[in-house]
Amino acid sequence: MKKISARWRNLYTKAGFSSFMASLLAILCGLVVGFVVLLVADPANAFWGLLAILTGGLSDMKNLGQVLYAATPIILTGLSVGFANKTGLFNIGASGQFIVGAYVAVLMGVKCTFIPGPLLWLACLLGAMLAGAVWGLVPGFLKAVCNVNEVIACIMMNYIGMYGVNFLIQLTVFDSLKNQSLPVAENANAPKLGMDLIFRSGATASSANAGIFIAVLAGVVIYYLIEKTKFGYELKACGYNRDAARYAGINETRSIVLSMVIAGALSGLGGACLYLAGAGKGIEVLDTLAAEGFNGIPVALLGLNNPIGIIFSGLFVAYLNQGGFNMQVYGFAPQVIDIIISVVIYFAAFSLLLRGFVERRVKRREEKRAADGRPAVSDRGPQEGGGAE
């Protein structure tokens, strides 16, 4: 029993545990507030409405497939925001990078039909990444060379991207009847890999495709890049203290520019994965910034900017969105669904605050143990035999 107790104490002293608890508390707080909103809207159906949002994504295989489809772009934009944050940058320009990458992917999917087989899909993905990278390069260069605040530069690039894409779609690949871009060639869509046979309900298949594997692979690659490479160490060093990094011989300008370029490429890839899915979805010509780019911000916050955490937080946010559709069965207006999801996302912004709360609780508990004459538990675990190392 003592060994089991020591293992549990060793668990809650680890930084990863406090990070997990911070995100979990943020989710629980958001759901509690959401339930209060449901009670105000319709007390009789509030419980069933909350149950619907918690279970809707698992109600059948088609809904589960739609969760995977919806999670793909926001995982990639979340990785974009989280990666830039490692260098101390706030990439609020993921929306512009996303839509520019999406446009290039759709344009190539419509016009470059001479590229054979699945090579067209791969070419579209690479084109989208290149376009997103260029869109991220601009604020990165301005920040690194001219010390222009990246938030201001990114916001401007968002609107330039939105209006520019609207203009270019009407010139090149416009479907006037649907007010959106033309459908891409069949071989420009992501392969289904049999997921349309697994994630379906009766005769209706979901939009799940190979894009989710690309998003997960991107998360693993970014994690390795940040945690296991010299380049990742340099990025984090610039994020922690740029003056110290410069003094240590790290090229600050290069790190900032490459950080935004990679972040832009990830957002552009997210745009391609959303519209090259064979779901019949086109880029609509609207004066509205792409929501997927902004949804990447709370996904990154909820995942505490950890690439692996971002994968799970992206799946969670997509799950809430899918489950939210089922709430309408109980007479709730769609706006109530948006409020609940927004509240959960809003509380995600307080993850770091909640993480500090968890760490203070752990610290007080360890101080109490020390005052009682019992040894505190270190991150390395309890010492065996009581001897010094």
Image: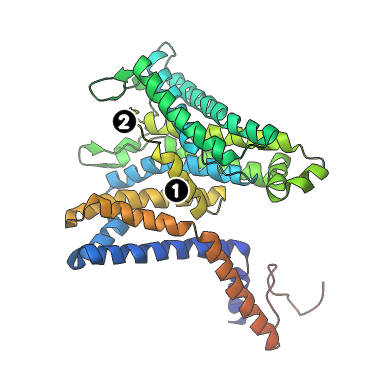
Q: Position of residue 58 (x, y in %)?
A: 30, 53
In primary-sequence order, the first of circles 2 and 1 is: 2
Helix, strand or loop status at disc 2: loop
The answer to whether residue 213 shows anywhere in this view is yes
Residue type at numbered disc 1: Gly
Q: From what the image shows, is residue 179 above or below residue 322?
A: above
The 10 Å Cα crowd at callout 1, few under 14, some 14 to 19, many 20 or more, is many
Q: Marks 2/1: CA distance?
A: 20 Å
Residue shown at 46%/57% (left/top)? 348
Residue at 64% x, 41% y: name it: 225
Using a 10 Å C-alpha cutoff, classify the residue at mark 2 as few (fewer than 14 neighbours), some (14 to 19) or many (20 or more).
some
Instruction: Determine whether, in the image, residue 1 is placed left or right of residue 247.
Output: left
Q: Image point 66% across, 83% down: which residue?
A: 369
The residue that mark 2 highlights is: 281
Q: Residue furthest bottom?
A: 372
Q: Position of residue 152 (x, y in %)?
A: 55, 39
Instruction: Give whichever of 147, 252 is nearer the camera.
Output: 147
Picture quadrant where residue 16 is located: bottom right
**The label number, if any, that marks residue 314 in the structure image:** 1
**What's the residue at 47%, 44% (across, down)?**
296
For the rendered model, the colour scheme is: rainbow
